[in-house]
Amino acid sequence: MIKHIVMWKLKPVAEGKTKQENAEIMKELLEGLPAKIDELDSAEVGINILSGDDEAICDVVLTTICKDAEALNAYAVHPEHQMVVQFIKKVVTERRVVDYISE
């Protein structure tokens, strides 16, 4: 199986909402994707609980599981995922990604 982990830093205000409000919207949108995308086995979203100006702190993390690279690639281009991506691009300042094989 492949784990796909994404971490984002959010803008303080975007799309007329606060960072916290946009984090909650991201969580709802992303965690709804497994019901819409067969290739996506699971999606878990965490919202950071720490505060501070540490450059290492991210605001939101996503962990998804797909059975293989083919499924991950299908998820990446799926129209439902792409709709969520369009929202996320409007509210984030940074993004980091790690994909790895998990047994």
Image: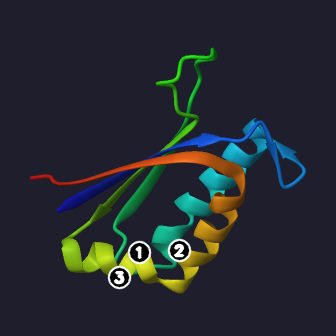
Distance from the alpha carbon under mark 2 to that under mark 1: 7 Å
Identify the element where label 1 is drawn. helix
Identify the element where label 3 is drawn. helix
Q: Residue at x 52, y 69 (%)?
A: 33
Q: Is residue 8 above or below residue 30?
A: above
* Chain-order first, disc 3 or disc 2: 3
Q: Residue at x 30, y 72 (%)?
A: 72
Residue ranking furthest to the left: 103
Where does residue 67 sit, x and y in percent of width and height? 21, 70
Quadrant for the N terminus in the image: bottom left
Q: Nearer the viewer, residue 36 or 9?
A: 9
* Chain-order first, disc 2 or disc 1: 1
Q: Nearer the viewer, residue 33 or 55?
A: 55
**Residue at which label 1 appears:** 76
Where does residue 80 sit, x and y in percent of width and height? 56, 79
**Residue at which label 2 appears:** 81
Q: Residue at x 55, y 60 (%)?
A: 30
Q: Please report contact status of discs 2 and 1: CB closer than 8 Å, yes or no.
A: yes
Residue ranking furthest to the right: 16
Q: Is residue 44 left or right of residue 66?
A: right
Q: Nearer the viewer, residue 63 or 32?
A: 63
Where does residue 49 sit, x and y in percent of width and height? 59, 23
